[in-house]
Image (spheres, rainbow, N blue to C red):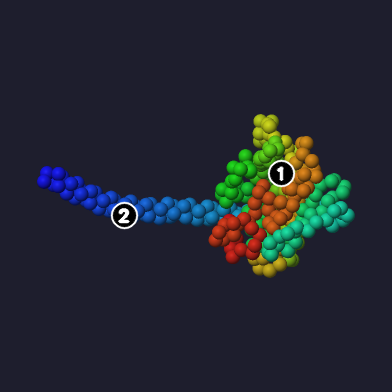
Amino acid sequence: MLVSVLLVGIRLNAAKEIVQLIERRKELRTNLSLLKKSLEGEETASWINDVEHDAKQREVTIAAIESGRSCSPFENSLIEEGLGMFDRFDQSSGAFRKLKHSVTVERSETKLDEATGLLLGRATAKIRATPQEILAYSLNFDGRHIQSDWNPATSVRSELLERVNAHHSIIFTRKKFWPLRQRTFLNSLVAKRLAEEPPTYVLVAMPIAGHAKIGRKDEMGAIRSENRRCFKLTEVAPGITKMEYVNSLNLKGSVSQRFTNAIAIPGQSHGAPFPSVLTLFVCWPNRAQSVVPCDRFWV
């Protein structure tokens, strides 16, 4: 009899505990749901704040660029060097190769520049943004979106060293090239209006010899390399820009240029001609890096 009473008591207590556990589980799920909504709200608010910050930053840069300040002789020399890459591509009789690309890219190909031994990558695409927006986004290398696009697997450092003026920024990046030694890149980004009708601009990213903020410690264990890029931007319809792009890469050191030509340049021009050093475009709503005509150029 006593044993039966004890067993019944235990069963009653167990049932009571099970009910309490179920209720506690429901309570925890409710709290977790509320917490998730709160975190999502905070994340969304932070993201909107970053978007608004970068949008205002672009507006200021665009207004400064449109004020008509002329380029210096040095800046003009960098622009001429960049535009000359298009001529080198067209005039070279070196090996030519068409690359596979997405349907939104009109052209993606490479050609060997026999004079330098460098492979030139070239691509053409249409972007749902004005040339001025593209320039401003690129020149503001300290923009919150660009700086948030950090990939520790490939990037060691990515920094705006100096904003020389509205149309000229100096940037420094240090990249991983495993199993090779790390590479550093010191570039001037310079923009200039080429024509008023149709609105046509050029943006170049050209290597420079040095900068006061970059010393021996900044490049210790790495090799200074050279990445040249030129973007010719023409507004072909309201808010639609035709982008023509050409680039070359020299990793320096003991790396065979043949290896660089075979791997790096095709990789930079395949589908989306935007190397990680100079990210330009992001699509809404998935925020994926791409050259497809987006519904909105948002950051």
Q: Which residue is mark 2?
A: 26
Q: Amino acid at mark 1?
A: Asn
Q: Which quadrant, please, contains the C terminus?
A: bottom right
Quote the CA–CA distance across marks 2 and 1. 57 Å
Q: Quadrant of residue 186?
A: top right
**Other-residue count near label 2 (Cα within 10 Å), few / some / many at <14 / 14–19 / ≥20:** few
Q: What number is the disc on residue 187?
A: 1
In percent of width and height, residue 60 lies at: 60, 54
Residue 51 vs 178, above or below: the answer is: below
Q: Amino acid at mark 2?
A: Lys
What residue sits 73% from the left and 37% below the top? Answer: 224
Most extreme residue toward the bottom is: 237
Q: Say what secondary structure mark 2 lies in.
A: helix
Which label was assigned to residue 121?
none
Where disc 1 sits, the SS reads strand
Residue 41 visible in image: yes
